[in-house]
Image (cartoon, rainbow, N blue to C red):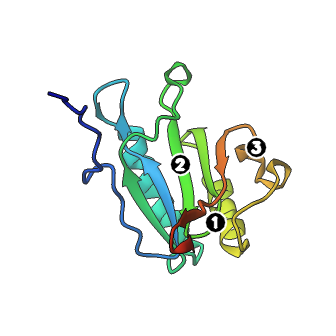
Amino acid sequence: MDVKPKRPVASSPYSVAQSAPHQILVCKACKHKDQACKPGFELLKSLRAAVQAAGLGEDFEVSGTACLAGCVPAHGEPCVVGYRATEKATWLFGDIDPDQPLDDLVSFARIYAALEDGWMSGHDLPPSLRDTTLARIPAAMIVTREGAIQ
């Protein structure tokens, strides 16, 4: 009798619905402490307010999510932030200090929204994000028997 291993299934903490054209995800679960991430919650609230104040609230939803697996515990209380949108590259930034100004995160949101495919050189990033980039993931192109879908 073959027993198939159980595969992980996305559950509510891991699946985040997107209601705006762009989404900023903020990690709010600390896998190293097995508890909610207070710095992540603070960053989430501050970033939501900053995005609204910058007039980007219609274009961006700022959501908390489960562990994004990009933190470096040796750096203290790091936060991980991701940007994603349909048919655009996804960006992941780590080691974000929630106590520092959010200007570069908001600046990146403005740039990202203006890019057709979300792709840019690391040199074009706002200064504080250049050394914190964890990943730039191309938009997925999924091909099925029926043809390409995004």
Q: Is residue 47 left or right of residue 135?
A: left
For disc 3, the marked residue is 130
Q: Tell me which amino acid carries mark 3.
A: Arg
Q: Tell me which amino acid carries mark 2.
A: Val
Q: Is residue 67 left or right of residue 112?
A: left
Q: Is residue 40 left or right of residue 47?
A: left
In the current view of this chain or complex, which residue is farthest to the right?
123
Q: Residue 100, relative to residue 44: is it above or below?
A: above
Q: Which of the labelled discs sits on residue 88, or is there none? A: 1
Where does residue 98 sit, x and y in percent of width and height?
51, 43
Q: Nearer the viewer, mark 2 or mark 1?
A: 1
Image mark count: 3
Q: Marks 3/2: CA distance? A: 14 Å
Q: Marks 2/1: CA distance? A: 16 Å
- The residue nearer to you, when weighing 84 against 52, is 84
Q: Residue 24, relative to residue 149: is it above or below?
A: above
| Circle nearer the N terminus (3, 1) | 1
Where does residue 77 sit, x and y in percent of width and height?
47, 30
Q: Secondary structure at mark 2?
A: strand
Q: Secondary structure at mark 1?
A: loop
For disc 2, the marked residue is 81
Q: Marks 3/1: CA distance? A: 19 Å
Quarter of image, res 31: top left
